[in-house]
Amino acid sequence: MATVIEAMQGDITALDLDAIVNAANSTLLGGGGVDGAIHRAAGPGLLEDCEKLRGCPTGEARITRGHRLKARHVIHAVGPVWRGGAHGEDELLAGCYRASFALAARHRVRSIAFPAISTGVYRFPRDRACRIAVIETRRFTADSLALAHVVFCCFDGETLGLYRAELER
Ligand code: AR6
């Protein structure tokens, strides 16, 4: 069956899916935004798991358990800081989605939610980031039957509107 790909507005930490993706930084040791929210909701065990990973380069991802979250796994993806667009930002952001899907497949994840990686503190233009997220998701799900459900979990209504429009194209 085809993968269901949808956008919703809400708090990603509350979702009851196999995996949620974190918009982390390369230390993997927590921060603000969705990263802070995920660590607060998951509890201190998440930081302990993250410490063992010894960081993650930009454009890649790592996986841990979900601890107190409903989600069984957290995939920590490190998005690029926006520096005008000529520093490989698009490819690095696409890399986050590809790496997250690769980990999801390896861990038999059937349902996964993404935040709008890099579009907060890291200032990546939201429409451009949304396009990349949808392109990479369609690319992966076209070749894979493993994922049943992909959710783009948007914190604000404007981001939700961008995803809905992109998914209708
Ligand atoms: N659920 C879903 N989306 C959320 C939530 C939430 N609970 N909270 C925020 N967002 P950001 P970045 C949205 O800044 O740009 C951290 O300090 C937010 O509105 O969290 O990749 C890390 O440690 C925005 O649309 O991540 C890094 O240092 C999106 O999530 C740095 O920020 C991403 O915003 C990463 O910056």
Image: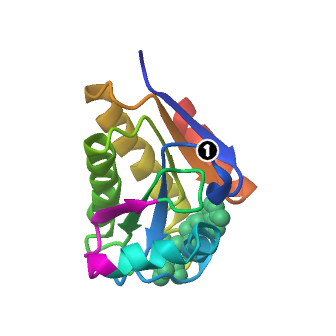
* Residue 113: image location, x then y, percent: 52, 48
The answer to whether residue 103 is seen in the rendering is yes
The x, y position of residue 146, in whole percent, is 33, 29
Q: Secondary structure at mark 1?
A: loop
Q: Is residue 51 left or right of residue 156?
A: left
Is residue 61 one of those drawn in magenta? yes
Name the one closer to the observer, 135 or 40.
40
Residue of label 1: 16
- Magenta residues, start to end: 52-65
Question: In the picture, which quadrant includes the N terminus?
Answer: top left
Residue 122 visible in this rendered orientation of the protein? no
Q: Quadrant of ligand 1?
A: bottom right
Q: How many residues crowd around disc 1 within 10 Å: few (fewer than 14), some, or many (20 or more)?
A: some
**Direction from residue 84 to residue 34 in the image, left or right:** right
Residue ID at (25%, 44%): 106
Residue 89's spot in the image, x, y percent?
A: 32, 69
